[in-house]
Amino acid sequence: MSRKVAIILFNLGGPDSKESIKPFLMNFFMDKNIVNLPLPFRAVLAKYISSKRSKREAGDSYKELGNKSPLLENSQAQAQALEKCLNEEGDGNTYKVFISMRYWHPMAPQVVREVQDWAADKLILLPLYPQFSTTTTWSSLENWKKALSRANYKPETSMICCYPEDDGFIEASARNIASVYKQALGEGQNDLRILFSAHGLPEKIIKGGDPYQWQCEQSAKKIADLLKEKLGKPDLDWEICYQSRVGRLKWIGPSLDEALDKAIEQGKAVLIYPHAFTQEHVETLVELDKEYKHIALKKGIKAYYRAETIGVHETYISALKDMVLDHLDKTTIESNTGKCLCPEQFGRCCMRVGIL
């Protein structure tokens, strides 16, 4: 029987104008998964941080991009590619891909209305975050469920919660890195270190049972192992690090700053790959391509390269398609493998908790 299948891509969101930078940041820091304080204190802190950062760090960064984030457009490109790929299956179903952003438009209440208007028979939730975190996928799912409840909408639903070691994701990542790696070798950079850079988190979130850091490490190792084969370099030099620290809390490490300092001290050139991001946005186009590059070159790095995110890479889009097709008859929340990937010490695993 043919069905109308709605795929909901979860992503962070970003401001679409100079005026929206502050409210976007306010939404971000009001999330209890980001700032774990009682509501009155969280509201005061969110107002202070959003006001300060919209005038300084974040405001300056988005100014480099025309006072807006390209995240929505890049996510839309992924949605269009996935929708085309799915509808070419010819299985009798009709597929439509929606984007639900967490902190700026289009947000969950609007998308729920759009899905209802389309009269979907089945919903499949699919984060554009390969690695699960309570600050991203969990938060998006909670928000989506709240929007469904307020709309009194109870569709048949399943969810892919994470895919940190998915073959398509790993293959697309390795291809992007290998291309830049070969370019660097051609330019005489034989002493080259790959830095897998993921967005950092406060250490207390990980200690509270969030599996994000562990999943980022598994992704980096899997990509590095494939690169060793592709490049014929069993002694491939690589490390994992974390970027985008905010505030005074202790964050997971090593930081990208520390990794760059180490590379400079050891006389290494670096190739940075943001393996926890699947599309270009402010943290890749400005933070990595401009800010960190400027600092590293000023400190005397031998050479600085950056591999692109996987975006609409056909291997990645094909992998997302396969995940969707695998969930057509499911009503569960699970990883792309169907099994719980996280070791038992990570209690905030949504598959284990079962919060769908």
Image (cartoon, helix red, strand yellow):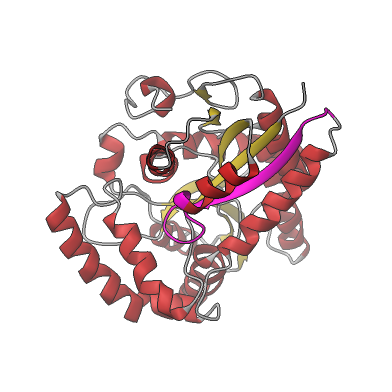
x and y, in percent, of residue 30 in the image: 27, 56
Q: Quadrant of residue 24?
A: bottom left
Query: Which residue occupies 50% across, 32% down?
Result: 161
Q: Quadrant of residue 119?
A: top right
Decide whether residue 319 is among the magenta residues: no
x and y, in percent, of residue 92 in the image: 82, 29
x and y, in percent, of residue 308 in the image: 66, 58
Number of numbered callouts drawn: 0
Foreground of the two, 328 or 110: 110
Against 334, residue 169 (above or below) is: below
x and y, in percent, of residue 217 in the image: 48, 37
Residue 191 seen in the current view: no
Query: Which residue occupies 70% across, 34% down?
Result: 4
Quarter containing the N terminus: top right
Query: Which residue occupies 50% across, 53% down?
Result: 110
Which stretch did the figure color magenta?
91-109
State left or right for residue 284 relative to residue 345.
right
State left or right for residue 170 relative to residue 153.
right
Foreground of the two, 56 or 245: 56
Foreground of the two, 81 or 201: 81
Quarter containing the C terminus: top left
Foreground of the two, 189 or 306: 306
Query: Which residue occupies 30% across, 45% down?
Result: 33
Residue 134 seen in the current view: yes
State left or right for residue 251 relative to residue 41.
right
